[in-house]
Amino acid sequence: MENKLERKYGLFTAICMVVGIVIGSGVFFKAQVIMQRTGGDMPLGIIAWIIGGAIMLVCLLTFAFMGQKYEKVNGLVDYAEATMGKTYGYYMGWFATTIYYPGMTSALAWLSARYTLVFITNAFPKFPLLIPAAEGGCIVGPECMVLALFYLCASYAINALSPKLAGKFQTTTTVIKLIPLLLMAVVGLIVGITSGALQQNMSTTPSAAELDALGITVSGSPLFAAVSATAFAYEGWIIATSINSEIKDSKKNLPKALVLGGIIIVVVYLLYFIGVAGGASNAELIGEGATVAFNRIFGGVIGNVLNLFVAISCLGTLNGLMVGQSRGMYTIAARGEGPKAKMFASVDKESNMAGNSAVIGLLVTASWLAYFYLSNLAGTWSGPFVFDSTELPIITIYAMYLPMYIMWMVKEKDQSFVRRFLMPILAFCGSTFMVVACALAHKMACVWYLIVFAVIMLIGGLLRKSKKED
């Protein structure tokens, strides 16, 4: 066994990694959530997308500056260690490996399965499901969960056995997933302007009676709630830093990939969201999502192809998340910390992949998938300790960024004003906004999540091997 990962990814693959990880299921199903949380107020929804995108970009730029300064094993953990010290770096790596990566990865495995079944059942209405599609079989049925587990294992296998193949898969799915987004952005905009639907949606909102009929209750802080929903859609770019030691000329190419990828993401999201408004009313978008707009503009057959593209999009995001998750324990072990550091730090000669790290990553992700299904989907669990395992871990990482921004400003005296102060201050404000928005949107669920978070972090502290002073 060797203990060094080769540099095998170029700039284009790194950009595809950023775009491919972020653009996935979020833009498709969170667009509907944003419409619900704003009560069908399209301009307010656009503002939420802009705020979420702006927060992502300023955070992304700040980390791009860190990427030019620091490089070791795993970008996020490297930056945490360099700014806050070895102990903070360890806990950041532990959190990412046990909560952040697996929480999102498990949800993407389920979403990939869900949209695959939606496509199949629409194309073949008589396709047998134990729970009929009309009764939620594509969402909580056993076929959905079996397929989700298959996708999870397949993604693990690709990353563990052939990292280069995983990179090529990421590039391919990134190109494919942009097709329906750009198609709806262009055609939806043209159709919406021609028919007047876009202007109608921008100037009116569903009535109170329509919202009641749809079962929608708008909170007292709709903008905060909507921005909180964008967190999932915009999240994932930081995971691309997990391969910084495998990117050719990383100090130059990783920052480029982050910046260019981030700009592409924000532009595509905004154009898609506006384009969807050209194909259906706000009330229809709240109740049925973007599928109704695709079916109306492109017809039932082509509209159903959207579900296939969404499934492929989710698979690409799943692969990107697994890239980070499969390297999680390696990131900790390569520093001589955590349980069985020597075992998890080993890299296979043939695949040039940390196989043992990938195995534990799969196990942890499967555990979160079980939690996600029982608490968020099937409703088997209720009461305490039920929380959104897709949004809350993301908000946690925004909170964990805050001291890193401060220490970057304190330590990096050789940086320019923009790099040392302006961007980190904007990133600090943006991250704080996300935390406040989450607290207002999720309320008591945040408390139950924080208890689980504290227990998992305590376990990480007990398992930590290194006791050296920072």
Image: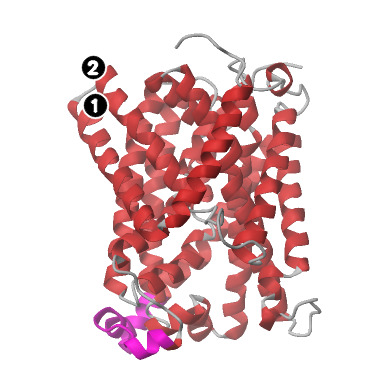
Instruction: Assign the N terminus to one quadrant of the image.
Output: top right
The amino acid type, in three-letter code, at marker 2 is Lys
Choose between 381 and 168: the one closer to the eye.
Answer: 381
Query: Of 389 and 58, which appears nearest the observer?
Result: 389
Q: Mark 1 and 2 residues: CB-CB less than 8 Å, in contact?
A: yes
Above or below residue 298? Residue 49 is above
Q: Classify mark 2: helix, strand or loop.
A: loop
Q: Would you say residue 270 is visible in this rendering? A: yes
Q: What stretch is highlighted in magenta?
A: 188-212
Instruction: Give the labeled residue for mark 2.
Output: 413
Residue extending furthest toward the front: 383
Q: Looking at the image, is mark 1 or mark 2 earlier in the sequence?
A: 2
**Label 1 crowd bin: few (<14), some (14–19), many (20+), radius 10 Å:** many
Query: What x and y, as percent, mark residue 158?
Result: 73, 42
Q: Is residue 166 positioned above or below 308 on the image?
A: above
Answer left or right for 3 relative to 271.
right
- Please give the count of numbered marks on the rendered protein: 2
Mark linked to residue 420: 1
Seen at 75% across and 48% down, the residue is 154
Quadrant location of the C terminus in the rendered image: top left
**In the drawing, does residue 115 fall left or right of residue 408?**
right
Quarter of image, res 227: bottom left
